[in-house]
Image (cartoon, grey):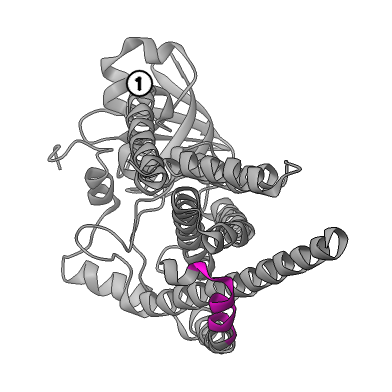
Amino acid sequence: MKPKHRRLTFVVIGLGLLGIAAALILSAFQESIVFFHSPSELAKHANLAERRLRIGGLVEEGSVNRSGATVTFRVTDLANAVTVAYTGILPDLFREGQGVVAEGRMKDGVFVADQVLAKHDENYMPPEVADSLKKSGQWQHMRQSMEQAGQIPQGAAR
Amino acid sequence: MHRYANPGRVLRLSRTLVPWLGAATALLIAAGAYLALVASPADYQQGESVRIMYVHVPAAWMAMFCYAILAGASAVGLIWKHPVAELAAKATAPIGASFTFLALLTGSLWGKPMWGTWWVWDARLTSVLILFFLYLGYMALHSAFDDPARGAKAAAIMALVGFVNVPIIKFSVDWWYTLHQPASVFRIGGPTIDASMLLPLGVMAAGFTTYYFYVVLLRLRAEIVAGKIKALRLRQVYG
């Protein structure tokens, strides 16, 4: 075997092993790499409710209530929902049907958040196009985007 | 490939290509900036902030593209002892680092008004920050040895090991729940960006690409010439 072939074999095998190692490490740390948990995960794993965490999902239509500086709303993944209470300034993109991520902890069945972030989906278009899509009934909601990303169970109750 | 192991041939080739690449870059960036800042519509949701995307997305693509070149050139340099590939890797690193920094900076400027935060430690943002540190580490390691050849070899190995991060960046938004949105252009099912916004994005991306080749050839030329000067000096001293 020529030295250059030996080096080539070494690099290829090395990178292959490295890729496998990285895949194993990442799948082992799956739980800590996710940025947020869904309301369904919160319902399933009781121990999640005992610590500080982020929950993510859609702002349920018609669930936003403002009283003074405090706003309450429900975050849903269409299978389960959690009521969130938050005092502070909401991001501009916050609205009903929008994806949000709230950070805080569970307190008496309510998720008390100290930070609320809005998600943005992969759709970019001018307002006229958005209007015409809405009119023709082809509007892609954030729901579809989060479903495709596996962040909402596929085919959950609409 | 071995054709271009000859530095003299690469110097001649770069002399022909550099003016064309410079002109193409100026033209594409000027047209792209006009399309992105003036001639394209505001977004239905983000308003005018969508214009940050025309710099952010090409910068992020180039950050990964440069790393692929860095790793590829490092591998060719290591395996075939290809002198020009080694220099091309060295010349690419600072450009890639700059693109990565630009992507992080513009992303942060977009994140504050849209998400409500400058920074989060989600998988996409964190893996791109790691990419930035990989570039910095490559440059530091390259110049950390008295013997430049040893520095080049150590840095090349590091570049190859760091390549594992590139697919992680690309698929981070699919593998884990992230705050960052999933891919809009290179995705199954085609782009989800309206044609009126896809055009300026494409022109900017083309401009960023020709810019990279323009600058990397200039840097490569400088590296080759610096190597020649060093050889001449050594010959003068040790004759």
- Residue shown at 26%/35% (left/top)? A77
Does the image show residue B117?
no
Indicate yes or no whether the magenta region holds residue B112.
no
Q: How many marks?
A: 1
Task: Where is residue B202? Give x, y as percent.
Answer: 40, 76
Towards the viewer: A89 or B202: B202
The chain letter under disc 1 is A
Q: In the rendered structure, does residue B9 fall within the stretch colored magenta?
A: yes
A18 displayed left or right of B189: right
Q: Quadrant of the C terminus of chain B?
A: bottom right
Of the residues shown, which amino acid type is indicated by label 1?
Ala
Q: Local crowd at mark 1 within 10 Å, few (<14), some, or many (≥20)?
A: few
Q: Is residue A19 above or below residue A144?
A: above
* Front residue of this view, candidates B32 and B51: B32
Main SS, magenta region, reads: helix
Q: Say left or right for B219 vs B42.
A: right
- Magenta residue span: B5-15
Name the quadrant containing residue B190. Answer: bottom left
The N terminus of chain B sits in image quarter: bottom left
In which quadrant of the rendered view does residue B20 lie?
bottom right
Q: Could you tell me residue B93's position as x and y percent?
A: 60, 56
At x 56% / y 44%, what residue is drawn?
Answer: B129
Query: Viewed as shown, does residue B228 lie left or right of A114?
Result: right
- Residue B215, above or below B100: below
Depth check: A102 or B163 in front?
Answer: B163
Residue for badge 1: A28
Residue in front for this viewpoint, B157 or B132:
B157
Across and down, in percent, residue B113 comes to 57, 55
SS at badge 1: helix
* Spot occupied by residue A53 in the image (x, y as percentages of width and height): 46, 23
